[in-house]
Amino acid sequence: MSDFLIRTIRKADNAAVAKVIRTVMTSFGAVGEGFSIEDPEVDQMYEAYQGHQAAMYVVVGKEGKVMGCGGFAPLTGGAPDTCELRKMYFLGEARGKGLGQKMLEMSLLEAKKAGFKKCYLETLQHMEAARKLYEKAGFLPLECALGNTGHGGCDRFYLRNL
């Protein structure tokens, strides 16, 4: 993990973050309507997460390459005390190094500091490593989606108290 740095997103990261999101989502077949790859914010992640109740982080490799991202914001159409874990994706070479756990812990801690009491997330059944990470971190499966994220392509939903 010492070859990587997790930091707050910068405006200059927008294109690299969009590329990470599109690369990872495409590799999992999560393309088209109903998936976060289609969210308008993908090309302006820095701007989209500049609120007092939102944050986006990036994983940067030794050479300064953005290798992953993740963060939180209020759950659209959800209870005011609930945030959503958003856009947590890592390129293959950044996986299996504990970065997902570190970014998840950082996001949950900051979400709690921002006043949220619960964190919600959506994912896919076949994103097994991600689901294991979330379950290990105390996220409990839900029977159906919460809020109005527009991600009808997701088929697994989780919630955790902060």
Image: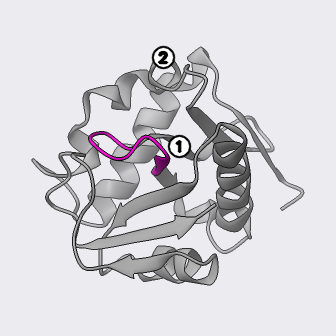
Image side of residue 83 versus residue 75, left or right: right
Whether residue 80 is visible to the viewer of this picture, yes or no, is yes
Viewer-proximal residue among 60 and 57: 57
Label 1: few (<14), some or many (≥20) within 10 Å?
many
Q: Quadrant of residue 154?
A: bottom left
Q: Amino acid at mark 1?
A: Phe
Q: Quadrant of the C terminus?
A: bottom right
Image side of residue 139 versus residue 42, left or right: right
Q: Amino acid at mark 2?
A: Glu
Q: Position of residue 84 (x, y in %)?
A: 44, 50
- Disc 2 secondary structure class: helix
Q: Residue at 64% of width from left, 21% of height from top? A: 10
Image side of residue 55 versus residue 119, left or right: right
> Of the numbered discs in the image, which one, if any, rests on residue 47?
2
Please, is residue 139 above or below residue 93 in the view? Answer: below
> Of the numbered discs in the image, which one, if any, rests on residue 152?
none
For disc 1, the marked residue is 72
- Disc 1 secondary structure class: strand
